[in-house]
Image (cartoon, grey):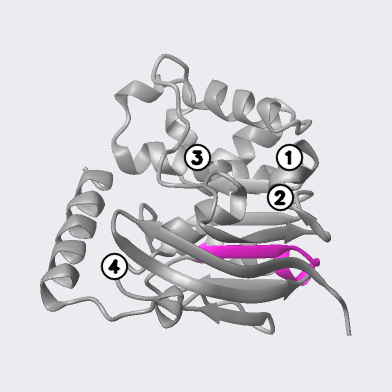
Amino acid sequence: MSEAILEVCGLTCERGERTLFQGLTFSVESGTLVRIAGSNGAGKTTLLRLMTGLMRPVEGEVRWRGEPVIKAAQDFWRELCYIGHRNGVKDDLSVLENVLINTKVASLTVSENEALDALDQVGLTDFVDVPAGQLSQGQRRRVALARLWLSRSVKLWVLDEPFTALDVKGVARLAALIGEHVKEGGIVMLVTHQEVPVEDARLMVIEPEKWSPRRRTAVERALDDANAAEAQNAGQA
């Protein structure tokens, strides 16, 4: 049995006066798809940000290869591809230029033809020379997702709602890519409201709300649902 490469140890996180989760603990081996599930406002996106070191927990820590991610710093980031709510797309650069500069920042060696192929996979072949500022939010999201096709050598993918801006064909392509990455020994951790059709993969489902010290009230859940719906509509505009 292989050893855990990613360890989450007793995480406690607070938002405002509310504790989202307390003592959250799990470990992940290579070749695992980790789905972060649960209702809106349960702390799914917050957990992803903790996993990447962008946020710090009140208690506990995240370890990568036995080292706390906060201390591992650059070594950890070289093995991480993180795509959150913010797409990291520069309006004054073309679609192709955005992909090339993002891969350069991530220390990936990518040719222009490889970048063009990645953009074809996300349905942006006809937009390669278009300034990103002229794209819809959904198209900007796909510019960010194109980086995944160029990050096969990166061990850990952390993705926040990666399927949101994709059509049926795009969802199938991305699901296939995720499946390939997991089968090749990678780890994919993602937040999604839908099942990921990946065959023969080791699947782990984590629900942060199960570590919550109290249940949310109906009013709190309604507000969280309304905020999530507003954010989703803005992303599809």
Q: Which region is colored magenta?
A: 181-190
Which residue, given by chain and number where applicable, does mark 2 sit on? 69
Categorize mark 1 by other alpha carbons within 10 Å: few (<14), some (14-19), many (20+): few
Return the x and y of residue 81 as percentages of the image width and height.
64, 46
Q: Write down the residue under mark 1.
A: 73
Question: How many angstroms separate mark 4 from mark 3 (CA)?
Answer: 23 Å
Nearest to N terminus: mark 1 or mark 3: 1
**Relative to 134, does residue 228 appear above or below in the rendering?**
below
The N terminus: image quadrant = bottom right
Labelled pair 1, 3 in contact (Cβ < 8 Å)? no
Residue at x 74%, y 28% (from the top left corner): 111
Which of 20/122 is in front? Answer: 20
Q: Nearer the viewer, mark 3 or mark 2?
A: 2
Q: CA distance from mark 1 to mark 3?
A: 22 Å
**Left/right of residue 107 with respect to residue 92 in the rendered view:** right
Dot 2: few (<14), some (14–19), or many (≥20) neighbours within 10 Å?
Answer: many
Q: How many residues crowd mark 4 within 10 Å: few (<14), some (14–19), many (20+)? A: many
Q: In the rendered structure, which disc, 3 or 2, sits on the residue that comes first in sequence?
A: 2
Contact between marks 4 and 2 (CB within 8 A): the answer is no
For label 4, the residue is: 40
- Mark 1 and mark 4 lie on one chain; the one further toward the N terminus is 4
Image location (x, y in percent) of residue 159: 53, 55
Position of residue 133 in the picture relative to residue 83 (left or right): left
Left or right of 235 in this view: 75: right
